[in-house]
Structures are given as C-alpha cells and as structure tokens.
Image: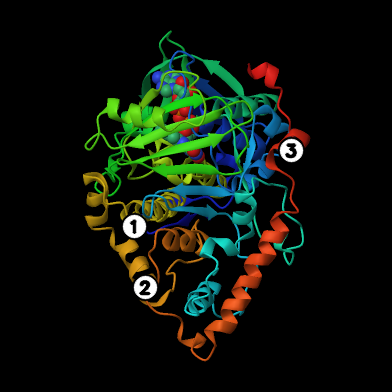
Amino acid sequence: MATRDMAGDSYPPDPSGERVRSVLVVGGGSAGWMAATMLATELPRGTEVRLVESEAIGTVGVGEATIPPIKKFNRAIGLDERAFMKATMGTFKFGVEFRDWGRPGDRYLHQFGRTGREIDPQVKLHHWWLLGRRAGHPDYPAWEDIFVARAAARADRFALPDKDPRSPLGRYTYAYQFDAHLYAGHLRTIAETRGVARVEGRISAAERAPDTGHVAAVVLKDGRRLEADLFVDCSGFRSLLLGGELGEPFEDWNRWIPSDRALAVPSERTAPLTPYTRASAHAVGWQWRIPLQHRTGNGHVFASAFSSESEAEQRLLANLDGKALDTPRLIRFATGMRRRHWVGNVVAVGLAAGFLEPVESTSIHLVQTTLERLIELFPTRRMDRVLRDRFNALTEQEWVRVRDFIIAHYHLCRREDSEFWRAMQAMTVPDSLAEVLELWRARGVLAIDGGHLFQLGSWSSVLIGQHFEPEGVHPLTAAADPAVIAREICRIAAEVETAAHALPPHDEFVAQYCPADLAEAA
Ligand SMILES: Cc1cc2nc3c(=O)[nH]c(=O)nc-3n(C[C@H](O)[C@H](O)[C@H](O)COP(=O)(O)OP(=O)(O)OC[C@H]3O[C@@H](n4cnc5c(N)ncnc54)[C@H](O)[C@@H]3O)c2cc1C
C-alpha cells in the first residue's frame, strides 16, 4: 500500500521502480565537478550521470581556500590527499588570520581546532582565561595563544595532527588552499573514470514537461537536446535553471553584507609558505591572500556603494606581498540565496544557489553539504515533495547560520576610519545573530547548537579577536584565585608553544609530502 502525506501525495512502499535513471549536471566549475564525482560515486550502477559545460563561458575561477570538513568530502569520493594536493598546487591551512579587523594593527587567527587543554570539564576555558586576566600578569597570553594551531601558524610550521587527541598536537585540524581550476580538473578526471560523460556546449533553452512543469531537457545552441530525470544546476551566478527557467526568487542580504565586488589577481609566491589564509581589512572591505605552491592568490572584496573600482584596485595592488602576475579581474556578485534550492526536479548547487562572500571560505563547503543532503534525501522520479521540503528547510537553516557568522565579522569590526565601517557597526543585525551576541556579551555563553558549522572555538576566536568580550565571568569561577588560574593559563600557552615548535616548517612539509610539478605550472 502506498503511504499518503497530508497534502495527498502518495509514496509507493518500494521506490526502486521509480528510481531516477539519469542526472544532468549543468555546469563544470568546482560545484559541477564536485556534484558529478559525488553522484558517480554514490548512485547505483546503471544511473546515467552527464555533465554539460561551455568552455567559451568558462568558470568563475576563484575559490581557493577551504575549511576542514572538506576532508570528509574527499574521503567520501575516495580522493587521495597527497595526489590531490600535488595536482592542485595545494598548501595547508590552520585557519584565517584577520588583520586590522579589531582596531588597525590588530591580528588574530580564526583557527581550526581546540585550545591546548581544558582546566575544568564543565566551565569552558574562555571563562577561566577571563578570570586569570584579572591577576594582571604582565605576559598574560592572548586568547589565541592557548590554541596550538595559532602557535604553529605563527611559526609557519605544519604537519598532519597527531592521532592521539590528548596530545597538544592532536588538538588541531586543518584545511586546504588550492588552485580552483586544477581542483575542478582533478575531479573531472576522477568523475570521467567513474563513468560521467562530459558534453561540451552552450545551453540556450530549457524544455518543460507539460504535465508536471518539471524540466524535461536542456537545449544546446547547436540544437542538441539533453534529457534527464533530475537536473543539478551548477551554472554559476547565471543560475540557468533554478533562477532563470524556474524563476525562484533571490533573497538579497545586501543590507547586512553590502560587499558586491571582488578584484582578483595572482602574485609571485613569497617565502615562507604561510599555513593560513589571510584576510586584511581595508578602509572599504577586505583583501584575501592565499599562498599556493606556484603562486599566491589575492583578491579584494569591496562594496561598490562605498568605493570605486579604481580605488579598490589601488588598495589591492598596494597590498601584495609579491609581484602581480596579471592585471586584476573584476567579479560582480550579490550576497544572498535563492529562496528554495530544490524546486521541481532541479537542485541548485554552488553559485547557482547563492553566494556568501568568501571571508570564511565557506562556499565550497556549502557545495559539499548540499550534495551530502541531496544524497541523503535522494528522490524518486516523483521528486517526492516531503524530501524536497526537508532539503530546503535544512539548507536555509545552514545558510542563515553561516550568514550570521559572516555578518558578525563586519558588524564587530572596530575600525572607525571610513563611512563603510561606521555603517557596518551601526547596522541592525538579524534577530538570530542579535541573540547570540547578547548572551555572549552578558554571560559568555554561546547560543549555538551542535548543528552549526562554526562552534565555540571559531566564534570565540572572532568575538574575542574583535574585542567583543563577555562583561562578566562565569559564576562558578567565583571561588577561584585569579593568580592561580593565570599561572595555569600561562602553562597551557607555554605547552602549545613548545609543541608547535616540534613541527617542521610548512614549506618543508609540503615539499616532502605533496610536491607539485612547478615546471608544469610555469
Ligand atoms: C570573489 C570570490 C571568491 C571566492 N573565494 C572562495 C574561497 O576562498 N573558498 C570557497 O570555498 N569558495 C570561494 N568562492 C566561491 C567559489 O568560487 C564557488 O563556490 C565555486 O567555485 C563554485 O562555483 P560554481 O561551480 O558554482 O560556478 P562557476 O565556476 O561559475 O561554474 C559555472 C559553470 O556553468 C557553466 N555554464 C554557465 N552557463 C552555461 C551555459 N549557458 N551553457 C553551458 N554551461 C554554462 C560554465 O561554463 C561553468 O562551467 C569565491 C567566489 C567568489 C566570487
């Protein structure tokens, strides 16, 4: 007997008779090839996976910094870390170093991982750190100084973490920095060996099924028709199917994140190879620096309402570490997302679904989680509405949480040197973020649940790094002597410093573990 839901849709007990037989991935940027590789790996044999892309249109070509969960995606598709890092000129990343975001001259690392150790299993370490500071110790460590990742990043050292989580060197994690074109190319090779067929061509139209309104086929400029049961729209900012054909509205988050332009330029590699991405605040917006084996990727994200392109270009070029290897390329974007990411038989992934500006390197991650969710909630040819609704609800929740974390960076910036930053400080943040900031300020408690991508280590780095500290300490620390706690915090900082210096220089680690063929890159 088929099950019926409240809207009257029925679901057969055995969905295998209605299984999806063909999927068309529309677009071959990072999102498209991640989707194709994942689908080719996970879908049952006999399901046809094709990808259509247009070389003439090309890809957005940026997106070089990632966050640690990408390791899970790589494992799921069976990617060999060394081979992939060699192929993509990759380097390792402990986090993002923020320069000049608090007050000009400030630096802090949003590091991936945990503090050197805890003092108390119940009361979080930042409360003890705040208490110990009251002792007025002249060399009292900064909050970031008790994270081993920070100590290692400062010394430009890196190795894979110790498998023993009790060791200080087992208390950090890492992500990758890589060349986005090479990443897509590497995945393409894997996807094609797993049976994905690539079609070269420019899509000029879509056809709909008259009964369901679902997309039945896309039509290429030369007249070829590509049919499928399910379409994964990875067409980039164009959002050909979800935004274009199906007209799903775009929710613009410009009122909180007004950045809408980036100028990107590669520069010569400089030594040492830093094991972190850098994000330096400017009078308007900020600039990224991503060190790769063959070059450094740079870009300046800014808001066109506050700065001209020529001013932005001057800021970008004045802040490069090495010689520019090209002229800066302008990318226009809007921060926000399509209201629903799955409509009918179209699921949008990557820039076709929306974009959150890259200060926390989250876009490739959102591609990954969207694909994981699609696999978990994979439909039959009926495009089961219950699955779709759950997918859309979870996706929206995830994007809003990441959005709030990004808004916090802008809103809590302490710079007063421009109209842009003054506007950021004066903005009314979304209620969901206001609640988090209020509780943190009042009691040092982080109102973030376990499902949030960014947890206490991340939020505390950013909040304390930008001088947004709790006003009081936890009541359960009341009986402790600040001087005793200060000595313990100093010991943790010394332990992580010693541990970090046992790691090899990042350059040496990369040269030994995953050296790229630099002659090929030249
Ligand atoms: C300034 C900037 C900086 C970024 N930095 C980071 C970062 O550090 N970390 C991170 O995780 N992410 C970052 N991103 C995001 C990241 O670049 C993207 O999320 C990722 O590359 C996925 O892009 P995409 O595949 O969705 O789109 P694209 O790369 O634009 O690919 C779109 C594809 O669709 C095809 N296509 C389009 N129209 C047609 C048509 N009519 N016919 C046929 N094919 C078509 C194109 O040919 C192309 O293959 C950044 C993005 C920007 C804009």
- Camera-near label (3 vs 1) is 3
Task: Answer few, some or many: residues within 10 Å of disc 2's Cα (few below 14, many 20 plus, some between 14 and 19).
Answer: some
The answer to which of 49 and 480 lies nearer the viewer is 480
Instruction: Inspect the image, locate mark 2, and give the three-letter code of the amino acid beneath it.
Output: Leu
Residue tagged by mark 2?
439
> Where ligand 1 lies, by image quadrant?
top left
Residue tagged by mark 1?
412
Of callouts 1 and 2, the N-terminal one = 1
Disc sitting over residue 508 in the figure: 3
Marks 2 and 3, Cα distance to the nearest angstrom? 44 Å
Task: Answer few, some or many: residues within 10 Å of disc 3's Cα (few below 14, many 20 plus, some between 14 and 19).
Answer: some
- The image position of residue 114, as x and y in percent, is 60, 63
Instruction: Inspect the image, locate mark 1, and give the three-letter code of the amino acid beneath it.
Output: Leu
The answer to which of 202 and 382 lies nearer the viewer is 202
Disc sitting over residue 392 in the figure: none
At 30% from the left and 46% from the top, the residue drawn is 257
Query: Can the viewer see residue 235?
Result: no
At 25% from the left and 29% from the top, the residue drawn is 308
- The image position of residue 320, as x and y in percent, is 46, 31
Ligand 1 has an atom within 8 Å of the beta carbon of the residue at disc 2:
no
At 42% from the left and 10% from the top, the residue drawn is 223
| Secondary element type, mark 1 | loop
The C terminus - image quarter: top right
The image's colouring method is rainbow
* Residue 124, quarter of picture: bottom right
